[in-house]
Amino acid sequence: MQLTVTQQERPWDRPFWKPVHGKEGVFAYLVLIHVLAVVGLVFFPVPNLKVVGMTLLSIAFGGLGTTVCYHRMLAHKTLRTNRFIEQFLIFWAVFNGSGHPASWVAYHRLHHSVTDTPEDISSPKQGGFWWAHLRWLYQTQPADKKRWAPELTGGIYKIWGWAETPVIVFSICIGLILGFGWMGFFWMGAIRLVYSLHMQCLVNSLTHLNHVEEGDSSMNVWWLGPFQLTAWGENWHQNHHTHAGSARLGLRWYQTDIGWYFIWMLEAVGLAHSVKRPRTS
C-alpha cells in the first residue's frame, strides 16, 4: 500500500519542541501562555470573585464564538446570522485563541473529509494522544485555505488577517487593561487561554479514542457534559460526525448542548435562520 505524504514525513517523530517552518509563532504563543499560566497560579492561586466572574464570562463568549460560529456556522453551514452577529462571534473566537476563521475552518473541513485516515493530520491514530491534542498545531503545515475555505479568504474576512495578533495581545492583557491588576492579568489572560485551548484540543484527542481498527473513531464523552465550560456540546462528537449537517450536537434530551441552546435563542428572536436540525429516519 502506498504511503501518504504525512506517513512518509512522520511529523509526530520530530522532537516535540521543534515547530515546522512557518509555525514558530504558534509554538511561541503556546509556550508563552503556558509559562504565564504557571506563574499566575504560583502567585495568585485563588482569585477573587470579580476576577473569577470576568474569567468565566470571557470563557463563555469565547467558547460560543468557537463552537457556534467557527464550527457550526462557518465550517458546516448549519445556520446563518446577520453580518454583525457573525463578526461579533468571530471576534470572540479569535479572542479565545482559535485563530483566523479561514485557518480553523480549513483544518476542520480537511479533518472531516479524511477522518482518522493517514491523511488526517490531527488524528490520534497516527501520532498518539499528545500529537492529536496539541503537537499537530505547530508541527504540521497549514491546511490549504484556498481549497478548504475559499469563501473565508476574501471580503470582510480579510480584516482578521491583520487583526488576529492585536486581538490575541488584547486577550492576554485584558485583565490589566480593564483594571483588575496582576491577578486579572494572569487569570483573565493566560490561565483562561490555556484552559480554553486544552478544552478545544480534547475534541481532537479524547473524543477520537474510540477503539476501532479502521475509519472514524469519534465517540461521545458523556462525563464532559456537566462541565459545559469545557464542552459546549462538543463532547457529543460521535453525534456530530454522524450528523455533521446539524447545528444540534446533543441529540437526546439528556445530552446538554449549550451551543445549541444559544443557537435556538438566536433563532427564536430572529437573529439566526436556516438552522439545520438532525435528519430523522
Image (tube, rainbow, N blue to C red):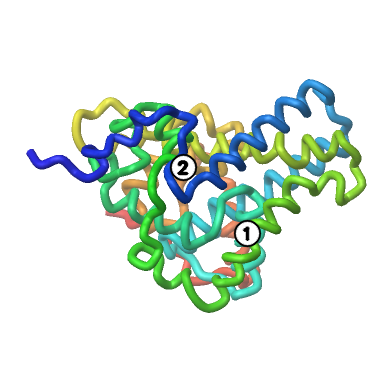
**Vertically, is 279 above or below 226?**
below
Which image quadrant is residue 75 in?
A: bottom left
**Vertically, is 7 above or below 101?**
above
Residue 81, horizontal then vertical, whole percent: 56, 71
Residue at 7% x, 38% y is 1
Q: How many marks?
A: 2
Residue at 56% x, 54% y is 99
Please indicate, yes or no, whether residue 40 appears anywhere in the rendered image. Answer: yes
The secondary structure type at the circle numbered 2 is: helix
The residue lying toward the viewer, choosing from 191 and 262, is 191
Q: Which residue is mark 2?
A: 137
Tell me which label, 2 or 1, sits earlier in the chain. 2
Look at the numbered discs 2 and 1 and tell me whether their residues touch, using CB distance below 8 Å. no
Horizontally, is 229 left or right of 113 in the view?
right
Which image quadrant is residue 264 in?
A: bottom right
Q: Which residue is mark 1?
A: 164
The residue lying toward the viewer, choosing from 47 and 23, is 23
Q: Characterize the local packing of mark 1: few (<14), some (14-19) or many (20 or more) Cα atoms within 10 angstroms.
A: some
Horizontally, is 274 left or right of 177 in the view?
left
